[in-house]
């Protein structure tokens, strides 16, 4: 652990966002991950995204399972409540938290072992339910914390550090999320901040289940030749279908692109996604087309990245449940308890 | 058989209905039970049903009990044999001198009957075929018809029964008329062709008073509404499912916003019990009162999460409606066999607060109280009932609620507290009772956030692997559990009429049978003090009670004497002083069983005076 602590000094000229916060206000405890671990870059991207979006840190609830990746919520947003739950079960805990207060921003952070191996069931059902959240899987193809065993996202034929070849078929969480009803689905690479930060921003402003699969190399156990989740391999095989820019209602700037190359998506909360096309034939509003495209390109060994699907009209779990606007955790006794009169009438009906 | 041998009894007998599952008999049988209650005579009905939906045999047993003994009695004075499949065993089950009621449409060979019982035949099928053309109607009204015949045979008030039907189908006049017509057909036939009334008779009384008739699971659901629960995560499992169904239906009624129809609650059917308890814990962490309902197999699946909630100190309420175990066990039979699995649920040094309701009234009160306790103690609270309480309608005290009562949300650190600069250590024992303060997410923009985790941490919620931090935390948790002793409902003692050195301890659904056994034993000169424990951790009175008696029977419904084990373990009691009385065949325990066992055991121990209790 060679990670050096950054001095928490505030320079007078540090840029501030609309809330008057600097980036430092979005940071957390010092990371204890290995130097160079992809997960730390994702934490930095989350910090940047929240800073850029002027999110009040305490309005975010960050939840995770167990693993190196799941430790990271301690390393960003120090003023947010965090919950490092149990292995593979973050989705249910997040779902419950979201039920209790519909007005917070829910950020779930998980690993490929946490979500695709032990937690595949909870991952699937949280997507199905339409939980309003940003769900990030920091995908390194191995269990980092237990020292490098293959996870369920490891590609068939990829080689472990000790030279063992994985013979099991991989689970592709992006395809699953698309099938199961996630309404914002992206993939990115921890080494591509330019792509990752806007993807996270779009997800945080999305209404409904937003899922981002971030390939995040484990430098200690899965960054060697023969691995399909190493920095080198991902750089070589990364095929981005688009680039995203998130425009908030308050931003007046209109970026100009050559006609036909830009797609505008207005999200539920008024934020606008500008998608600059990189793949001519890619349509991010076509769920089935996206699945087909991904499958086709994956067969060619490409890692497709970008905003792969977005449905800005999606409804979330609270709409399905028709819950009151006011968060359930703020309803007082008078709203909850029917009182003695009702009970008397009930007693009468039970005689 | 001569009439002299036939059982003669007023307001004290057992009628058993043998039916086919899915034939619509349940509502007719319930009508029978309620008609007797309307006459002011207590009844204790119980369903005995298989783990399937249609086709297998079911029984409904109604104990008519003028004295108000609501435990199962055992035996059968009258069998209403409506299921050809179980005919032989049903006929064999009738007590000598009892009565057999059956559909005599098809002639039966003499060998199918017994000489020592009174046989009462009504050609129900023939009458229904003559009256109705539709197959479903024939089936449904046949049930009402036999109730009509029983009304005549047992001298039940016909008008009271009619009124009951009118109340039940209020607003649906056609249904009222059709049901009363069927009732009348059965009644008239019996009056004309059978010797009404028979030796078993219902006589008006005033023993029911203002008591209500409801099943324990519904009462739990109502308790959750009154207790302020807003989030329920659950997964269907017999016999707990109807807790959530009741919660949902009461919520639709009492928790729907009158202005816009919005729900002041959220119920999510999870994909399994891991997810249901995960949701409960997530919601509770975020400040909503939340609960789940489950049974043994669900409790097993939830173990890891119980440990998390215990160690991270998150309130949660779990209704465990116990059933026959281990494994899938006897899903539709009753047992008290999850006690240890709940008391020490999850790996490591854990211990949990348990509440033991005796009947629907306590399902409601303890169910509501569980939410206050969970918030106050910041820990999971289990409400342990069982199938016998949960899935049978039971007479109980009417529910009451004090409108002055406010929810106890426990030790919450507020925005104002944080602004005022109060020292916030999430796991800091400020008051010496082991209970720390917590913040709900989003309480304050810059103060009060902390990281919740299942790993060891220091008093300020920072990750720590230091032995001293670990021990501080464990000792505080122990202190907190001791604090719980003074907060949970205290035990209820019923003294013998004479000073005695013998005691008995029991809990939950054993209550009514034990109360009756107590009276039987007293009448027979066996004097014991009895104590019903209502919670774990055990209050000091429980240990004092054991200390005050030479030995104590521990009466419970499982094979391995789990309550006894818990008492021995927690109170460091000499095992010899706690005598097992165990009932665990899946049927509810009876007073006869308890009295016989205690009499036998007491005589072995040479307690005088001893006389045999009539079996
Ligand atoms: C129930 C349970 N089983 C096993 C473990 C051990 N364990 C801790 S982390 C982990 C794997 C984590 O892998 P992943 O989610 O990919 O996270 P990474 O460390 O790679 O970021 C395992 C198996 C555990 N904590 N809990
Ligand atoms: S073991 Fe791998 S995943 Fe874990 S911190 Fe180190 S590099 Fe990251
Ligand atoms: Mg991993």
Image: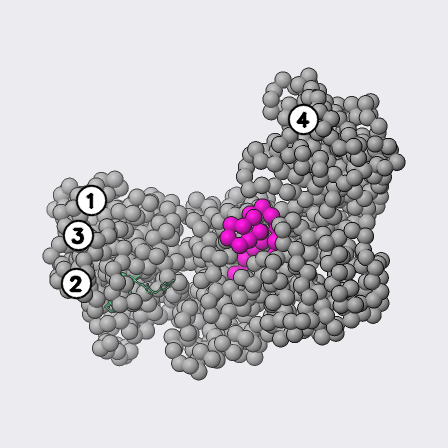
Using residue B175 as the reference point, say whether residue B609 is left or right of it: right
Using residue B378 as the reference point, say whether residue A254 is left or right of it: left
Numbered disc in front, either 4 or 1: 4
Chain bearing mark 3: A
Placement of A6 over or under A296, stated as above or below: below
Q: Are marks 2 and 3 in contact (CB under 8 Å)?
A: no
What residue sits right under mark 4 in the picture? B141
List x then y, in percent, for residue B105. 70, 21
The residue lying at 88 percent from left, 36 percent from top is B4
Cα–Cα gap, marks 1 and 2 = 27 Å
List x then y, in percent, for residue A301. 14, 50
Cα–Cα gap, marks 3 and 4 = 67 Å
When asked about the image quadrant of residue B174, the answer is top right
| Span colored in magenta | B315-336
Q: Was residue B325 drawn as part of the magenta stretch in this picture?
A: yes
Cα–Cα gap, marks 3 and 1 = 10 Å
Q: Residues within 10 Å of mark 2 (few under 14, many from 20)?
A: few
Chain bearing mark 4: B
The residue lying at 19 percent from left, 61 percent from top is A164
The residue lying at 82 percent from left, 42 percent from top is B11
Q: Secondary structure at mark 3?
A: strand
What residue sits right under mark 2 in the picture? A163
Q: Quadrant of ligand 1?
A: bottom left
Res. A303 mark: 3
Q: Nearer the viewer, residue A10 or B61?
A: B61
What residue sits right under mark 1 in the picture? A295
Numbered disc in front, either 2 or 3: 2
Cα–Cα gap, marks 2 and 3 = 23 Å
């Amino acid at each position: 652990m060679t990670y050096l602590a950054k001095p928490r000094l505030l320079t007078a000229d540090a840029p501030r966002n609309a809330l008057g916060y600097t980036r430092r206000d979005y940071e957390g405890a010092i990371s204890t991950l290995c130097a160079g671990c992809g997960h730390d870059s994702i934490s930095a991207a989350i910090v940047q995204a929240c800073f850029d979006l002027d999110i009040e840190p305490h309005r975010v609830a960050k939840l995770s399972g167990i693993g190196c990746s799941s430790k990271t919520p301690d390393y960003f947003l120090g003023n947010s409540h965090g919950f490092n739950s149990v292995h593979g079960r973050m989705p249910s805990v997040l779902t419950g938290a979201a039920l209790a207060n519909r007005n917070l921003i829910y950020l779930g952070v998980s690993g490929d072992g946490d979500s695709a191996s032990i937690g595949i069931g909870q991952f699937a059902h949280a997507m199905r339910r339409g939980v309003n959240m940003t769900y990030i899987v920091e995908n390194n193809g191995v269990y980092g914390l237990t020292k490098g065993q293959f996870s369920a996202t490891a590609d068939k034929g990829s080689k472990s550090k000790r030279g063992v070849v994985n013979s099991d078929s991989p689970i592709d969480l992006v395809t699953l999320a698309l099938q199961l009803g996630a309404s914002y689905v992206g993939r990115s690479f921890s080494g591509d901040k330019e792509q990752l930060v806007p993807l996270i921003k779009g997800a945080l402003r999305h209404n409904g289940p937003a899922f981002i699969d971030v390939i995040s190399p484990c430098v200690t156990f899965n960054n060697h030749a023969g691995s399909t989740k190493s920095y080198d391999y991902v750089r070589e095989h990364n095929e981005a279908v688009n680039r995203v820019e998130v425009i908030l209602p308050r931003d007046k700037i209109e970026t100009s692109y050559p006609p036909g190359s830009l797609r505008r998506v207005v999200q539920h909360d008024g934020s606008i996604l500008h998608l600059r096309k990189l793949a001519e034939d890619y349509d991010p509003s076509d769920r089935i087309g996206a699945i087909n495209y991904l499958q086709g390109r994956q067969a060619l060994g490409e890692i497709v990245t970008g905003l792969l699907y977005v449905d800005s009209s999606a409804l979330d779990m609270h709409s399905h449940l028709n819950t009151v606007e006011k968060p359930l955790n703020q309803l007082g006794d008078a709203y909850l308890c029917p009182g003695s009169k009702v009970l008397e009438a009930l007693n009468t009906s039970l005689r | 058989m001569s009439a002299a041998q036939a059982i003669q009894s007023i307001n004290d007998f057992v009628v058993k209905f043998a039916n086919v599952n899915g034939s619509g008999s349940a509502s007719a049988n319930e009508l029978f039970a309620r008609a007797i209650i309307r006459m002011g005579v207590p009844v204790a009905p119980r369903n005995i049903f298989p783990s399937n939906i249609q086709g297998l045999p079911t029984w409904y047993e109604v104990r008519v009990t003028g004295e108000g003994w609501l435990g199962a009695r055992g035996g059968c004075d009258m069998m209403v044999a409506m299921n050809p499949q179980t005919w032989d065993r049903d006929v064999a089950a009738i007590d000598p001198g009892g009565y057999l009621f059956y559909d005599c449409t098809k002639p039966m060979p003499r060998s199918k009957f017994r000489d020592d019982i009174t046989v009462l035949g009504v050609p129900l099928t023939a009458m229904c075929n003559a009256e109705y053309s539709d197959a479903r109607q024939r089936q449904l009204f046949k049930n009402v018809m036999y109730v009509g015949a029983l009304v005549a045979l047992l001298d039940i008030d016909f008008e009271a029964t009619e009124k009951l039907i009118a109340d039940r189908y209020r607003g649906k006049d056609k249904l009222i008329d059709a049901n009363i017509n069927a009732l009348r057909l059965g009644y008239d036939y019996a009056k004309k062709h059978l010797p009404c009334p028979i030796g078993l008779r219902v006589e008006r009384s005033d023993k029911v008073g203002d008591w209500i008739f409801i099943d324990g699971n519904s009462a739990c659901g109502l308790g959750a509404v009154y207790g302020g629960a807003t989030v329920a995560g659950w997964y269907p499992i017999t016999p707990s499912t109807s807790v959530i169904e009741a919660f949902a239906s009461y919520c639709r009624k009492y928790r729907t916003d009158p202005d816009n129809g919005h729900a002041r609650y959220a119920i999510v059917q999870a994909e399994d019990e891991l997810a249901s308890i995960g949701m409960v814990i997530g919601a509770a962490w975020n400040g909503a009162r939340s609960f789940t309902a489950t049974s043994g197999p669900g409790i097993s699946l939830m173990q890891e999460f119980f440990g998390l909630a215990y160690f991270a100190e998150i309130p949660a309420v779990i209704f465990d409606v116990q059933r026959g175990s281990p494994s899938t066990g006897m899903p539709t039979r009753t047992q008290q066999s999850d006690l240890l699995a709940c008391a020490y649920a999850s790996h490591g040094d854990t211990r949990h607060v348990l509440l033991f309701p005796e009947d629907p009234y306590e399902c409601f009160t303890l169910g509501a109280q569980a939410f206050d306790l969970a918030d106050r103690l910041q820990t999971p609270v289990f409400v342990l009932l069982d199938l016998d309480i949960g899935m049978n309608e039971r007479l109980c005290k009417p529910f009451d609620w004090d409108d002055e009562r406010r929810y106890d949300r426990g030790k919450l650190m507020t925005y104002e507290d944080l602004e005022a600069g109060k020292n916030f250590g999430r796991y800091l024992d400020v008051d010496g009772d082991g209970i720390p303060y917590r913040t709900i997410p989003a309480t304050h923009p810059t103060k009060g956030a902390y990281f919740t985790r299942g790993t060891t941490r220091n008093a300020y919620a920072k990750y720590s692997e230091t032995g001293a931090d670990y021990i501080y935390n464990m000792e505080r948790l122990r202190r907190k559990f001791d604090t719980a002793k003074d907060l949970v409902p205290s035990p209820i003692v019923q003294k013998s009429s004479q000073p005695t050195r013998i005691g008995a301890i029991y809990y939950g659904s054993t209550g009514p049978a034990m109360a009756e056994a107590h009276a039987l034993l007293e009448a027979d000169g066996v004097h014991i003090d009895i104590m019903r424990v209502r919670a774990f951790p055990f209050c000091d009175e429980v240990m004092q009670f054991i200390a005050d008696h030479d030995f104590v029977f521990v009466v419970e419904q499982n094979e391995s004497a789990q309550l006894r084990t818990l008492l021995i373990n927690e109170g460091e009691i000499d095992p010899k002083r706690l005598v097992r009385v165990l009932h665990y065949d899946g049927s509810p325990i009876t007073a006869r069983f308890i009295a016989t066992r205690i009499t036998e055991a007491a005589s072995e121990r040479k307690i005088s005076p001893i006389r045999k209790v009539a079996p």
